[in-house]
Amino acid sequence: MGKQADAKPEAMAQLVGASASTTGTVNARAGAEVLLTGKDSEGYDDPILTFSWRQVDDSGVRVDLVERTANSRAFSVPAVTAPTTLSFELTVTDSENESSTDRVNVRVEPVADADLFLRLKVTEPALYQYALVVGREPGEAGAGEFVLRLDTVARWPDRNGDPRQRLISSETIRGQWPQQASGAGAIADSPANPRFLRRLPTLDADEINRHYEAEADRDLRLEPDQIDRAGIYLRVVLESFDRNARVLALTADGSSRELLATVNGVIDSGLVAVDSLHSRPGLESLDSANKYYALIDAPPTLAQWKARAGFQADPRDQPGVAHANYNNNYDLGFGREMYLRRDRDCGNVYSYVNNYPTLETALQGRNRFATVAMEYSPLDHGCHGDKLVKFYAFVPDQTTGEDVLARSMNFDGRGERFVPGVCVACHRGSVPDLSAIPLAEIDGLDEARRFQLAHLESSFIPWDMDALLFADDDPAITSDYSRLTEEQRQRNSRASQQQPIRAMNEAVLATYQARPERFAASIKLIHGWYGAYRDAGPCEPDGSDPMPATITQLPDQTFDGSFVQCGWRGEEPLYHEVFAKHCRSCHTQTDNLAKNFETAAELMDNASLLPFVFDSGSMPLARLTYDRFWVDFNNGSSAAATLAARLGLDSTRRPGRPLARFAVTAIDPASGTVNDSPRTGDSVRLDASSSDFAERFAWSLTSDCGSTPTLVGAAERAAAFNLPQRDCAITVTLEVSNAQGSDISQQTIASHPGP
């Protein structure tokens, strides 16, 4: 491709992020985040001035392209019900107005997900929703209808600090009240008042910024350093009603908030901060992140944290600091510039990682978007006392250039997740409930209480070199590879970084040695990578490898990813293709030792394996790991197929199929208390929140009660009815459906007189 006089430019369209293939037709999972790039296009005798991307297929499935750089566009792979091919055309134009085009195709695999990535409570999806209850004004009776509009609105300061607002989505909800019910009693408790369950929305800067890509609109965008000042809001408007009504918002902890009351002339709630609905313990918010940072005395800038942690401003050649550059290919997919310092006198360990879109931009120091820091040290950051793991996140300030403390991160492209939960999701542990403690009182807590709240039971994750990509890996799978010099490739190759990564793994072991029983699986895993069990003897009685005599000293110099944990012998394909790549990194760290899957039996016999992985799409918990699990990075058979075959599953069992599940709650209408077993006259609430991938709901009742009770919310996620004042049985049927099909679930409720 040498230089040619008066030659037209040559367009090269590539898709990066889905697999090792980047041209032609690339496989990707529905829901994956991928990047279209023209970085290898060539302007021979004149420079390329413009890169223009457009979708050109006739699939009927459209995507929104979000600008990342002049030559690249990102998009979320859309949901489909069958394998679907999307085509994208790149046109490049040079300074002489000469142009050329190229295309790349994306074959979309129809595998959905639960949209709970990096969430802590994947077993309780109802925690991430709220309910709107539309109740008639007390004293009003008779049938009635209403129309409700539900808006989601984002607000943020732009680059100039001016306030901006945008409607993100709007939904019209139509409902009715039954004839025989009245507005008497508590609005939230009456089964006659329709209840609408909706997912709590999250702030997503990409969704905002895609509307402001024109040069004239750039200053209107939401920048990373302003996200802490941005917010997502709900607005409820009762557009029509034939009875006076009140609208309440109910949160997962049972608390309620009145949004509007027509009797007072109010039909518009105004903007309601979603953060104010995060009242359930374990649901994080900007407030909880601020309190966590107060607990650990987080400094306002990265420079201050580095100074406190003993790092020089540029620690690349600092004695005692390990440094490595790589792409974490089975985790978040970022280019990472990692630094770690181990204080051997105090036993403290400090690390921080600069995150970039690709490995190449990391090596060139371009387009850094976030820095995440961790430390293992006493609460007062000194040398003595019990140690704990702490998390910090920083983003560049667009005005000053400093890296400032950030309360949330959008690591998976699914919206902001708050610190520390966004870290704890993989580093394991739990997030404390700080809702009852005002921020101003955090500093006044005694040290023992602060330590208890700040100690998350989290841990450093070992560096698995087989999960990383280095500068000498196939250039087709990384972006802007041509910008690297040969010296950069060699210095940042896998072989050249064996020693610093070994030093990092020894530092990780140093954070485990105070509690070897808690971290036994991780200790043995790291030692296994470095030759401790090369001459494998018998397993321990629990099926694991024996504990090494010296925890913090590794026997070999070179990482060997072929090691298989003792409890997985005989299951080597399952270990390497499924567990090691897609489960081990997080599960080995868990303090729930029954779920660290140190043996194959622990994984295969786990009751959550099938529903979480093949039904609800809740695991793996990181979005890129999930993508890699369902679509093999190297274009071979997927890990999902390997696991399904081992379990004897049909190939059609994959997330996206609707599955009907519901809960029944019987409530005494007089006291409002929940009864363990239904009693005559109880109010019965039906909740289908646990259903998977349900887009439409159809409830029905049959009974031997002489007459069938009136069902409120028959087409909603939540429904309700009153049990008759007699002994009888009512069968509840729920049918859920989506474009892939339908599913039915039934329960029979037998009512009896109370005591």
Image (spheres, rainbow, N blue to C red):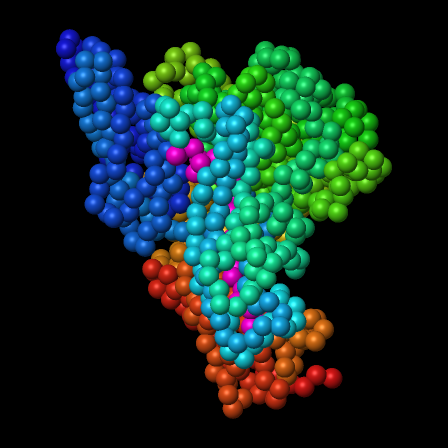
Where residue 108 appears, as percent x and y from the top left, is 31, 45
The residue located at (69%, 21%) in the rendering is 309
* Picture quarter with the C terminus: bottom right
- Residue 89, position in %: x, y? 23, 32
Q: Which residue is more in the foreground, 394 or 206?
A: 206
Q: Nearer the viewer, residue 552 or 55?
A: 55
Image quadrant occupied by the N terminus: top left
Q: Which of 424 and 687 lies nearest the eye of the viewer? A: 687
Q: Report the span colored magenta.
A: 190-211
Question: Going by the image, does 334 lie left or right of 749?
Answer: left
694 shown above or below 336:
below
| Residue 583 seen in this snapshot | no
User: Which quarter of the picture shows residue 374?
Assistant: top right
Which residue extends farthest right? 446
Q: Is residue 579 magenta?
A: no
Q: Residue furthest bottom?
A: 706
Residue at 60 percent of width and 67 percent of height: 137
Quadrant position of residue 470 = top left
Q: Residue at x 19, y 27 (%)?
A: 101
* Residue shown at 55% from the left, 32% from the top: 227
